[in-house]
Image (cartoon, rainbow, N blue to C red):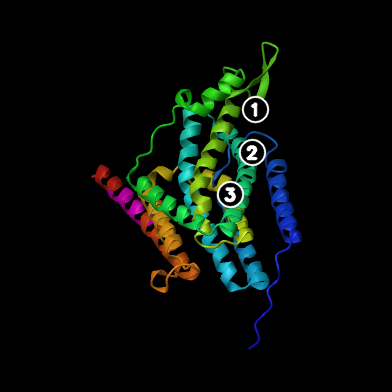
Amino acid sequence: MMAVALTAITPWHWAGFILFVLACIAVDMGAFNKRARVVTFREALVWSGIWFALAMGFGGLLVHLRGHEEATEFVTGYLIELSLSLDNILVIALIFAAFRIPPELQRRVLVWGILGALVMRGAMIGVGAALVQNFSWVLYIFGVFLVVTGVKMFFSKKEAVEPEKNPVIRFARKLFPVSPSLEGQKFTTRLNGAFALTPLALVLVLVETTDLIFAVDSVPAVFAVTQKAFIVFTSNVFAILGLRSLYFLLAGAIGLFRYLTAGLAVVLVFVGAKMLLAPHHHEPKWFQVEIPTATSLLVVAAILAIAITLSITAAKREKQKNIN
C-alpha cells in the first residue's frame, strides 16, 4: 500500500488559522459582548460544546492534512492544555472574588484576557520551538521542571488572593492612579482630570499575569507530546478559546472538584517523565522509553477521569453525611 503524502504546513496555513481565531474572537467580542450581562449556565454549556466541536473538527482536518499521528498529538496536547486550564479557572474565580467583580463584568475581562493570552502563548511557543530545534537538551530541562512543578502542586494548598500584597498590582498602582470604584465595563477613566485605571483594569492585569504563570507549566507540557510548533500552537489556542465559556460553566462548582489539582499534578509528573525518557539520538538504547502518543492520551484522560470521579464521590458522601 502506498503511503499517503502529507501536506506541508506553510505560512498560509499559519495565516489561515490565525485569521480563523481572530474571526472567532471578533464574533465573541462583537455579536455577544455589546453590553454587560450575566452569562447563563445554558449559554456557557452551548459555547463550551461549540469550542470543543471546533477543536475536534480541526483534529479531523489534521488527519487529512498530516495523518493520524499528528492529529492524535493535537488532541492529546489539547486535552493537556484544557485540563491544566481548570486550575487556572479556580485562580481566576479567586481574583474576581477578591476584587468583588460582579458576574456581568467578568466576561469582558475574560475576552480581553484571552486576547493577551494568545499573544503571550504564541511568543512562548515560538521561543520554545526554536530552543528545542537548536538545543535538544532543553527537553530535559522542560522535563525536570514539569516533574518538580507537579510534585509541588500535589502538596501545595490554594491561597486566597490578596490584591494589596500582589507585586504586579502594587507596581501598576505606582505607574498609574486607580479610581476608587468600578465604572461599568471601562478599563480606563479620568480621575481629577488625569488618565487613570479602573479596578477592572487591575483585574485584567492580574488575570494576564496568572495566565503567564500557568503557561510556563502548560506550554512545556505539550512539548512532551510533540515538538511541532504548529501542533503545539493550535492545541494551545483551542484550549484558550474555550476558557471563557468553561469558566462560566464550572466556576460555581469548581470548589467541588477537590482532587482535581492533585490529578493535574499527576498529569504534569507523567508528561515530564515522558519527556525525560523520550528517545534522543545521543542516548544509549537501553535508556530510551518511547510512550506512544495514543497511550499518553489515554493515560491523561484516565488520570483526569479518576480525579473528577473521586471528587464527585467525596462531595456526595459529604452532602449525605450533612443531611443525616
Question: How many angstroms separate mark 2 from mark 1 (CA)?
Answer: 11 Å
Callout 1 touching callout 3 (CB < 8 Å):
no
Q: Name the residue under label 3.
A: 240
Q: Which residues are drawn in magenta? A: 308-317
Name the chief secondary structure element in magenta: helix
Amino acid on which the number 3 mark rests in the picture: Ile
Residue 246 percent location from the top left of the image: 53, 48
Say which of 127 and 104 sits in front.
127
Within 10 angstroms of label 3, few (less than 14), some, or many (20 or more) residues? many
Question: How many angstroms separate mark 1 from mark 3 (CA)?
Answer: 22 Å
Is 193 displayed left or right of 280 in the figure? right
Q: Residue at x 43, y 44 (%)?
A: 254
Amino acid on which the number 1 mark rests in the picture: Phe
Which quarter of the image is occupied by the C terminus?
top left
Q: Tell whether position 222 is magenta.
A: no
Residue 27 percent location from the top left of the image: 71, 47
Residue 279 percent location from the top left of the image: 47, 68
Q: Residue 112 carries which label?
A: 2
Is 262 displayed left or right of 73 in the figure? left
* Mark 2 or 1, nearer chain start: 2
Within 10 angstroms of label 1, few (less than 14), some, or many (20 or more) residues? some
Question: How many angstroms separate mark 3 from mark 2 (CA)?
Answer: 12 Å
Q: In which quarter of the view is residue 30 placed?
A: top right
Say which of 121 and 302 sits in front.
121
**Visible in this render: residue 87?**
yes
Q: Name the residue under label 1.
A: 187
Q: Which residue is drawn at 26% across and 42% down?
A: 322
Is 89 displayed left or right of 261 in the figure? right
Residue 121 percent location from the top left of the image: 60, 47
Residue 297 drawn above or below residue 141 = below
* Mark 1 or 3, nearer chain start: 1
